[in-house]
Structure formats: C-alpha cells, structure tokens
C-alpha cells in the first residue's frame, strides 16, 4: 500500500503513569480492585466552557444521562478524588519527571505552567474534568524514517477505571483517578502503520530511562490518530500491545476506504482497538472547546534553578541507533541492564560510559548473542575492557557444520541432550533458541 | 504588552525563533498568558517576547435568552440571586471562581427547573457570602417581604460560607412568614459538570412545589452522593465541613424534609401553621459581637467589647470561662451589656448549674443560650436589641421564637452522623 498516495496522516499519543503519590493529593498511586470500602453515586451535567459553548462530546454524554457509581478505597482515595475537596498542591516529583522527559524529548519547556480543566463527563473524572497542563512544546525524536515532532508534552490526572457499564449506570474504580499521567503527543508526520509502532517504542524507551515511571500491564497506553484523504480523523485507543498497532491502523484505513467507496460520510470518532485488529465505536470525537483554567491551582513558574536540578543522567538515544537492533533491545541494554548489574551483580554500573554501551551493541549487531550483553558490560566494569573474542559470534555456516557433526555422533539422542552438548561448546556465543531451530532443521 | 490589545484577541507572539498563536488571556506585567489552539493556556515571560501581532478581535455575540412561558398549574417561584458558588463561573480578571451569572443564565443552564415551578429570577447583588453584612440581610428581607404575596415561594442562591447566618437573620426579620423561603448554596461551582448546585436547586424547587411549607429553610446535599437533598432548619444548621457537598448539618435538631433526586419528598417533619400577618422587622444592632474563650486568653480580648450592647461568649464545655476573665465579664454586664453563654462543643446544651464556675457566671448575670448555636444567638441578639427594649431582649433571648431553641434534647444513636 502506498501510504503517501493515500494521504495517510497519523500521530501517536502515549500516556504513561508515574509512581509515588497522586498528582493533587497525598494518596499513594496504587490501583486496587478488591471489594470497595464505600460507594458514592453521582450525576454529571454538561457545563459551558470559558468561551460559553458546551462541548459536543459533553452533550452526547449528558443525553445518555447515566448515573455514576464510584468504588472508594480508604487507603488510596480521599476527598480530592471524590471531588469533595479542592486539589492540593501539584506533586513535585511528578512535575520533575515531566520536565526530565521533556528535556529528553528535546522540547521547549514553558516558562509558566497552568493546569487546565479538560471537560470529561463520561464519569471517569468525578469533577467532570481532567486536570491537565501543557509542560513543554516542540520536541522531537529521531526514527529510522526521519524526525517525528512532539508538539506537546502534558502532565495530567489519570481517570477512574471502568468496572462495569450498563444502559443506566457506570461503575468506576476511584483508586486509579489522580495518578500522575504523562501525555506525549506526536504530530501527524508518522509515515505508515509500522512507523507508528516504531515511534511508540521509541517514546516508551525514553520514558523508561528515568526513575519514577510505573511499569507493568496498563501503565502505558497509546492512542493513535489516523486519517486518509477523503476520510476523517479517527482516534484509536485501547491497544493491548505495541505489536497490534500496525494491524489496527491498517484495519482502520481499510474501513475508511470501504466507506469512502460506498459514498458514505465518515464521522470523526474515538474507536476502541480490539485484539483481532478491528476496532469499534466508543464515542464521538471531543471538540476543541473543552478546556478552561483550573483556578484552584496557582500557576507554576519554571525557574532556571529548578531546571538545573532536573537531569541526573541524560541518555542521547539517537547515538545508539544501530542497524539491525530494535529500539526495545537498545533501551534494555541502556536502561534495564545497568540496573540489573547494580542490583544482581553488585557492580557499579555508573562507571559505564557511552562508548562501552556502543561497543557492546556493535558486537551484538555483528552476531554476538543478545543475552551476553549483561556479561559483556559486567566484564567491562570488572576488567576495564572487553575481551571481544570471548563473546565473538559463530558464523551460521560454522555452527551448522558443527551441529551436523554432533547429530551424527549422537544418533538417537533427544533434542535436549543435543542442545546441551552444543551449548557446552558455544556458551555465551550463540542463542539457545537458534541452536534448537537448527537442530530441528538439520536432524 | 501593547496597550491596544484586549483579552480575547487572537494574536501571534514571536518568542526566540518560534511564533505562537492563540487567544490573549488575562496576563500580568511579567508574563503573558496565551490560550493555544489546542485549548491549553501557557505563560510566556514578557522579556522573551520579540513581537506581538493582532490577528483578529473577538466577535461580539448578543445573547438571546429563552422567553419563559408560565404554566398555570405550577407554583410561581422567585429566585433571588445574591452570589456565591451556586451561581459562579471563572473570572478572567482574577483567575478565581467568582459570582458572575445573569439570573436567566441559571435557568438556561438548568432547564429542568421550568417543569416543576414557574421561575422568575432577580439579581439582588453579587457578592461572596463572606462579604455579607447586616445591610445585605436587610435587602434580602425587604425583597422577600415585597414579593411574598406575588409568589408561592422564594429561593435565594447564596454562598455557603455564611449561609447559616443569613438563613437565621431572615427567619427573625420576617415575622409570620407565610411562604417558603429556601436558601440554596453549592460547594462545587456551577461552571463544572460535577456541581451540586443543580440538585440543590432542583430539590428546593420540588420542595416548594410539593409542600406547603412556611418559614425559612436551607437546601443542600444530604450525603456526598447525588441522591437526596435535605431541607434544614434556618436557625439550627451549621456548615460543618470546608469542602464536602454535605457540609451543612443540623445541630441539636432535625431536618425539615428529605427530597430525592426525582423530586419526591422522602421524609417530612411537622410543618408549622400559618399564623398572623407578615411583619418585616428588619433592624439589626451592629454593636453585638462573639467572643470565643480559649486557654490563656487575655482580658484585653474581653475589654474590647466595652462599647457594645451585647456579646455571645462561646465558652468551654457546659458554658464556662476561666477565672481570670470573670471580672472583665462582670464589668461588661455592669456597664449594660447583655452577655449570653453558648458552648464551643457545638453539640449539646449549656448548663451553668453543674459546676461552681457556671453558677458564679449566672450570679453575675450571664444568660444561658440553652441548645442554641453561637451564630444563631449572635443574630438573635442583634435582632432583639434593635427591635425590642433591653428588658424585652433579655427575656426573649431565652424564649423559642423561630425554632432556634428546643426544650428537649432528643436521643440519637450518633449525635453526628459521619
């Protein structure tokens, strides 16, 4: 498919939860899902924004007129989440992480940060708005298909999690509400569905490089905005894994093409990605008139002193983009492995220089096994240098002939026994999976 | 910032190598606030700005408000608007929430009200309730008096901070009130979708529509949930929480009614009978004050009331003050002040016969407030001193005039619910 010809436009929004306390109160940022301690019932109404107009999405929700039921957990929700107390001061740690990420994304940080109320009346926010602030603008990341701009980086409140939904009511888990959330949005310069996945991976990698980021299922979410010529902008959300992004985008392109062919008018809407690569209607696309200032929180000045304390360790990822290595693996080597060396091997990984990481990544790109990365880096810390030969990869040809020989010598032996025999010889130089595949192929 | 620019103008601001486009918001000398096209507001330090270009001035739209048709089968209700969170929105000048509603906008925002009652609305004034004084009570009482024959009921929108004082003042000033006057506040401003203003207004209107109540009441949330509202007695209700929706609770008494979100009356106390002719007694004495006793208090605190006509002492426990203060209080009484004792316990009844200190206070002429709230006694005393002789005032302060004082202390399993 020629995406350029299609008029393909695509941007990604990454939402990342932060660890620690909630954004506007001192409740711990933990999500519970056992039996709630209390239940509170509420109704929400559409209200006019700063410019006096009621948002389309808000009107839609009000028409439904649902009742919202909030599950309350004493130890991680308080009156702030219940909209029964004004927000406390902004969580300084969360703000610091937002500033760190903004710098890593090469963005320009705003002099003054004002939290806004983004109107949301589907009940996921008890206040009927989400508090959000634009922290930085005009960032970018480099990708294999060129630079992708990051026009906005926002710090906001996570919404309450839906538990159950019927025609008349929605039950929400209030423990998730208020967890600090970073929103990183690219512009529409993503080239194709695969590229959207690459961009998401790269942003995820940068996020993981700072401390205080939540890890695990559901702690990072991607929304993808897609449109094609004669079609319309649709927001896709709810991706289970990054792998599914290209397929769901492709599905949306196909859906729009089909509708265009039939001569139907397309509606701008939010759609939920399903595991099978299709998507379903969620709600109409919210309009632009849905924000007004959060007057309970004073404007925050970002001073040079504050900025000078922000960055502890800056990683310039672009330096480490090596052909043949995917972003996730590079991030693992740069971020996760040093942490593991410190905790598991008790070695001082802060001694590692950029050139050391580059050396190891280069060796791996030339054939050294991936799982040797930690040993290689550990060797550098212990010995001050890397014995390249120790981890030198074996050429496929060499390996194949050896395997053939061993199979011939050990007729009737199980695969496991054969693998064991080969790994004895090539320990740390080839990947087990590769050996298994070759044995299956050759025997 | 160039002076010709006005808030609301679409402008282009050049900063460094970047041009930012957006709507000019209220700004300070050191920083310009811009609302970007994506809806976010950002601040830009003015010293960094190279150039500002005006692109477009906002279009002026004349607002057309819906004309209200009257339904002959419905009761006629007047909404008197005084300000506060119940009818507030964002103020661009201060960045804070302030009362800035045209009364009709309330109906435009809450069209459901029209189905229950015929609404007329009038702006009395527009202030925060902490700024209210006796002159405002007089205006409100006068407005109720003037409209009491034209309407079946009156709703007064009011800031919550001092709503209890106002309710009590109106109850005293409007003698033999023959219609319901319900004060309605909100703890979340009505510019937000989660505001409690709507349910409070709706339940107040439903109560007026369905119950032939006479007198002054307050309508607020029963609990944090948007399930029911309660109609609370004017002189026995106190704001007991800074921020919760259900902040208003009855102290030493019971609710008048409970109204559901569907407008049904779930509970109803005995409604007083209509008696006599409405009389406006709207005078209040300014020289009345409140003194809260605390450990280590200086007698100077007490002496400052020398030129007053009466004070309420919010004493400790059953109604006590420290030994060192007795002489100062005695001097006040000897110079002509009426001194009433309430308790800072809030709940319960003053009884100065139990301990010798109490008896000593009774001997020097301190009067027990019984189970009346401090705020209520303050208003009642100001009202009595302005409308009656000192002798009458001293007698009437201990009589129940507006359901502000009860004879019995009724048992409840929990005297306070949460």
Image (cartoon, helix red, strand yellow):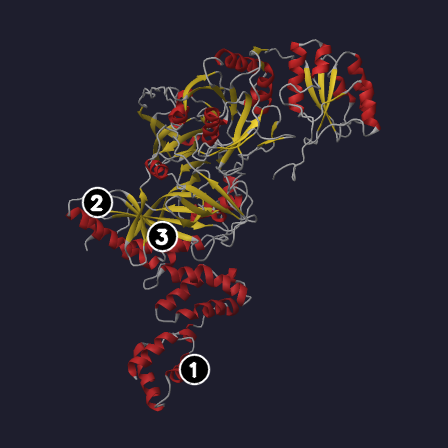
Query: Picture coordinates of residue A81 (x, y %)?
Result: 50, 42
Could you confirm whether marks 3 and 2 are on the same chain? yes
Quadrant showing the C terminus of chain A = bottom left
Label 2 sits on a secondary structure element that is loop
The first of marks 3 and 2 along the sequence is 2
Give the camera-side residue of A431 and B193: B193
Q: Residue at x 51, y 27 (%)?
A: B185
Structural distance between the alpha carbons of marks 2 and 1: 59 Å
Question: SS at mark 3?
Answer: loop
Q: Is residue A316 visible?
A: no
Would residue B226 appear left or right of B162 to someone viewing this image?
left
Location of mark 1 (residue): A424
The vertical placement of A40 against A331, above or below, is: above
- In primary-sequence order, the first of circles 2 and 1 is 2
Q: Which residue is mark 2?
A: A231
Q: Quickly name the residue at label 3.
A: A238
Res A368 quadrant in image? bottom left
Task: Check if mark 3's residue and mark 1's residue have beta carbons within 8 Å.
Answer: no
Disc 1 sits on a residue from what chain? A
Q: Chain of mark 3?
A: A
Task: Tell me the distance, in whole angstroms, between the alpha carbons under discs 3 and 1.
Answer: 45 Å
User: Where is residue B44, by image quadrant?
Assistant: top left
Q: Closer to us: mark 3 or mark 1?
A: 3
Residue neighbourhood size for the residue with mark 2, other residues' Cα within 10 Å, grouped as few (<14), some (14–19), many (≥20) = many
Alpha carbons under labels 3 and 2: distance apart: 22 Å
Residue A423 at what x, y percent from top left? 41, 80
Relative placement, left or right, of A413 versus A195 is right
């Amino acid at each position: 498919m020629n995406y350029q010809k299609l008029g393909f436009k695509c941007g990604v929004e990454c939402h990342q939860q932060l660890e620690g306390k909630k954004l506007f109160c001192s409740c711990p940022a933990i999500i519970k899902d056992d039996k709630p301690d209390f239940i509170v019932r509420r109704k929400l109404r559409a209200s006019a924004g700063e410019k006096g107009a009621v948002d389309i999405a808000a009107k839609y929700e009000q028409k439904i007129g649902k009742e919202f039921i909030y599950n309350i957990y004493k130890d991680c929700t308080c009156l702030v989440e219940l909209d029964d107390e004004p927000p406390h001061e902004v969580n300084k740690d969360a703000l610091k992480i937002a500033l760190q990420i903004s710098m890593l994304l090469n963005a320009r940080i705003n002099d003054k940060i004002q939290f806004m109320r983004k109107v949301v009346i589907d009940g996921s926010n008890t206040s009927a708005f989400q508090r959000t602030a634009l922290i930085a603008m005009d960032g970018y990341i480099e990708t294999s298909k060129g630079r992708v701009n990051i026009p906005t980086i926002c710090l906001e409140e996570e919404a309450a999690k839906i538990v159950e939904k019927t025609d008349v009511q929605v039950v929400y888990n209030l423990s998730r509400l208020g967890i600090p959330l970073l929103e990183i949005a690219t512009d529409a310069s993503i080239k194709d569905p695969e590229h959207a996945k690459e961009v998401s991976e790269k942003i995820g990698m940068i996020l993981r490089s700072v401390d205080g980021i939540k890890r695990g299922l559901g702690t990072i979410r991607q929304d993808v905005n897609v449109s094609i010529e004669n079609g319309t902008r649709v927001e896709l959300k709810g991706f289970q894994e990054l792998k599914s992004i290209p397929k769901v985008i492709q599905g949306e392109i196909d859906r729009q093409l089909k509708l265009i062919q039939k001569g139907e008018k397309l509606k701008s809407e939010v759609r939920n990605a399903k595991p099978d690569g299709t998507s379903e209607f969620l709600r109409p696309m919210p309009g632009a008139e849905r924000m007004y200032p959060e007057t309970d929180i004073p404007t925050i000045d970002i001073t040079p002193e504050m900025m000078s304390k922000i960055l502890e360790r800056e990683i310039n990822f672009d330096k480490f983009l090596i052909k043949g290595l995917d972003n996730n693996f590079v991030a693992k080597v740069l971020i996760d492995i040093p942490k593991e060396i410190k905790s598991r091997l008790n070695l001082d990984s802060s001694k590692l220089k950029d050139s050391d990481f580059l050396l190891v990544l280069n060796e791996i790109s030339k054939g050294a096994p991936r799982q040797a990365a930690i040993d290689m880096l550990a060797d550098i810390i212990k010995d001050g240098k890397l014995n390249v030969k120790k981890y030198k990869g074996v050429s496929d040809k060499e390996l194949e002939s050896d395997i053939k020989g061993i199979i011939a010598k050990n007729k009737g032996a199980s695969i496991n026994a054969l693998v064991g025999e080969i790994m004895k010889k090539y320990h740390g130089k080839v990947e087990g999976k590769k050996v298994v595949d070759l044995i299956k192929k050759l025997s | 910032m160039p002076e010709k620019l006005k808030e609301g103008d679409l402008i282009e601001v050049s900063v460094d190598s970047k041009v930012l486009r957006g709507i000019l918001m209220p700004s300070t000398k050191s920083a310009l606030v811009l609302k970007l096209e994506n809806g976010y507001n950002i601040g830009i330090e003015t010293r960094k700005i190279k150039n500002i270009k005006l692109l477009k001035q906002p279009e002026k739209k004349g607002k057309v408000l819906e004309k209200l048709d009257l339904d002959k089968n419905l009761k006629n209700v007047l909404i008197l608007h005084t300000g506060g969170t119940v009818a507030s929105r964002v103020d661009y000048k201060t960045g804070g929430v302030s009362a800035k509603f045209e009364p009709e906008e309330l109906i435009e925002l809450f069209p459901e009200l029209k189905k229950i009652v015929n609404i007329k609305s009038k702006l009395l004034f527009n202030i925060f309730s902490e700024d209210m004084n006796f002159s405002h009570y007089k205006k409100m009482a006068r407005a109720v008096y003037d409209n009491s024959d034209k309407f079946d009921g009156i709703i007064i929108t009011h800031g919550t901070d001092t709503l209890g004082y106002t309710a009590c003042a109106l109850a005293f000033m409007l003698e033999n009130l023959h219609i319901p006057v319900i004060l309605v506040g909100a703890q979340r401003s009505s510019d937000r979708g989660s505001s409690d203003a709507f349910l409070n207004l709706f339940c107040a209107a439903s109560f007026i529509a369905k119950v032939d109540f006479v007198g002054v009441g307050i309508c607020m949330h029963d609990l944090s949930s948007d399930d029911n509202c309660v109609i609370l007695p004017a002189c026995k209700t106190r704001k007991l929480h800074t921020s919760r929706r259900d902040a208003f609770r009855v102290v030493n008494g019971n609710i008048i009614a409970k109204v559901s979100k569907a407008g049904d009356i779930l509970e109803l106390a005995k409604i007083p009978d209509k008696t006599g002719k409405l009389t406006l007694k709207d005078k209040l004495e300014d020289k009345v004050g409140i003194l809260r006793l605390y450990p280590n208090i200086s007698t100077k605190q007490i002496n400052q009331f020398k030129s007053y006509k009466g004070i309420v002492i919010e004493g400790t426990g059953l109604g006590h003050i420290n030994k060192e203060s007795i002489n100062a209080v005695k001097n006040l009484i000897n110079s002509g002040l009426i001194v009433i004792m309430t308790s800072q316990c809030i709940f319960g009844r003053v009884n100065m016969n139990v301990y010798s200190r109490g008896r000593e206070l009774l001997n020097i002429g301190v009067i027990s407030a019984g189970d009346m709230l401090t705020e209520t006694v303050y208003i009642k005393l100001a009202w009595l001193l302005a409308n009656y002789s000192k002798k009458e005032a001293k007698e009437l302060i201990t009589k129940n005039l507006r359901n502000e004082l009860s004879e019995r202390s009724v048992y409840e399993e929990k005297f306070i619910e949460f």
